[in-house]
Every structure is written in C-alpha cells, then in structure tokens.
Image: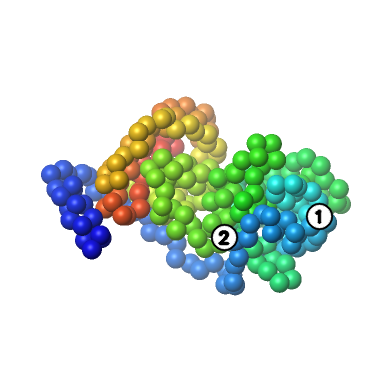
Amino acid sequence: MTKIIYAVISILLVMGFKSSPTYAAEPNNEEYPLDFHIEMLHWEKVNKILPRYSIFTVIDVETGKSFRVQRRAGQHHADVQPLSKKDTKIMKEIYNGHWSWRRRAILIQTDTKLIAASMHGMPHGAGALDNGFNGHFCIHFKGSVTHHSEKSDLSHQVMIHKAGGTIDDFIRDLTPEQLTTAFLVFIKNNDQGLVQKVAITNKQNANKEVKKINNIESINWKLVSVNEPNLFALEADIPVEVNLLVKNIGPVKTKIPFHLIRTSPISPWKINMDPLIKLTKK
C-alpha cells in the first residue's frame, strides 16, 4: 500500500514539468571470473585470521589474476608485501604496468575462506622482502581505518562492497550528497562499471561518455554545504568544488553544480555526469 501511495505522489510531482531526455549507460553484465562464497568480515576478525607474517593469496576481482603476499604489519588494516618478484610482476600487470593509489576490489583467499577486501597499488614505507617491490601496500577490510586519520576510507569501503557483491545495496540507500561523493570516488578509482551504475547523461551514447573518465588522471573535491532535499523530492542539486588533472589539458579547477534525479521517492538517485565529462574535452 505504501508503494502505491508513493507511486501516486510521484506521478503528481512529475506532472507539470518537462525535462530533456537522459540516458543511462548499459552495465557490463559479464560475470566476475570467480564464483565462490564470499564473506565480508570485519577487520577485528580478519586481524586474527591473518596474523602478522601470515601468507595468503590476493585475487583481483576484475581480471581474476592472483598473487601471493605476506602481511608484515598494520594495526587498523593489513600492511602487506608481494611474496616474490613474480608476485610483484603480476600485481603490476593488474595495474596496467603503473603503480597507482587507485583502489581495486579484491578477494583474500586463505585455506578456508574467501574474504572481500580492497587494495591500492602504490609501494610506500618500509619493505623487508627480496621481491622487487620498494615498500609495502595496504589492504582494507570492512571496518578498517587509515593509520594516520583513524577514519574509514570511502574509496576502500566502496571496493569492499564491490568485492562482496553488496554494491547495489550500498548505492540504493545513499542520499544525494552521499551518492555525489560515491560517484566521485568511482571516478577517482577509474571504475567505469560503478560509474555506469549511478550516472546518466543527456548524450545518446552513454557508454561512450563513461569511457571519457579515462582522461581524468586525478581528482580531488569538496562538497559545498547544501540542505538535503525533502523525502519526496525527485530532483536535487549538489554543488562541488573540483580539482582535476586532465590528460592533454592539465590542471582544471572549477565548481560543478551536479544535478541528481530519481523516478520516485523510493527509487535510487542518479547523477548527471555531463558537467564533469565536459571538462575532459579541449
């Protein structure tokens, strides 16, 4: 009954205004290369399952490639190193030959478990193994925080949801401000699949527009404070100050008024990506 009431309200709200057509990119329906029972375990449990000096396998969700690592340290998340030069080579292949801070959805395979997690691909800090990897990298789990801020890293948490198969549930409950932040995180991680889940465009070839995020080499942002729309709103505007580094263009600093819509008060929000994509063109 509640859904019927919401539907009637939505129709009444939609009547009376016109908007230009928008298009959603078609999601990539390819199955992940793996199909096992995946657990989203909290860091407190993982910390005991993967103690210091333990060795385990990292599986990249998108490519299916895997490599071995050893946990060397880490109080709030796992600081790990590739086990050998061969493992370092595989990890670098996953990052297309270039070390990067971009987060990736991964699965941690132990003798008895497959755990959802997230990693970045940038060697930093200390390293002790003869593996051709200058330092260590970080793996986050549900409930992990960074060492310095002791705050949850949204970029990692998004990838953990992706690895655990719960990303759709995560997106569905986001407010306009939260969805805008998540969208920018997807851009930062250069994850076209996740961008497709939340973004719309006024262009007919939505998939072509999504691919243009490859031109964004780095992005930082700050949401300008706004009042949250009421529970029945079907549109919202979220202004964001962005700093971009765009391929073949250079640094770009501007303010973008992102426009979000939904089809009913119980539907998930979608964000129009056109103002951001426009900045990637000369």
Give the foreground label among 2 and 1.
1
Instruction: Give the percent coordinates (x, y) of residue 39.
Output: 60, 65
Total numbered circles: 2
In this view of the protein, can residue 85 be seen by the observer? no
Q: Is residue 238 left or right of residue 247?
A: left
Residue in the image at 21% along x and 52% along y: 10
Q: Quadrant of residue 274?
A: top left
Q: Mark 1 is on which residue type?
A: Arg
Q: Residue furthest left?
A: 16
Q: Mark 2 is on which residue type?
A: Ala
Label drawn at residue 123: none
In this figure, which residue is indicated by the disc labeled 2?
163
**Tag 1 secondary structure:** loop
Residue in the image at 72% along x and 51% along y: 78
- Tell whether label 1 touches label 2 (CB within 8 Å): no
User: Which mark sits nearer the N-terminus, 2 or 1?
Assistant: 1
**Tag 2 secondary structure:** helix
In this figure, which residue is indicated by the disc labeled 1?
52
Q: CA distance from mark 2 to mark 1?
A: 23 Å
Instruction: Give the percent coordinates (x, y) of residue 128.
Output: 86, 48
Depth check: give the residue in front, 35 or 29.
35
Q: Tag 2: Cα neighbours inside 10 Å, few (<14), some, or many (≥20)? A: many
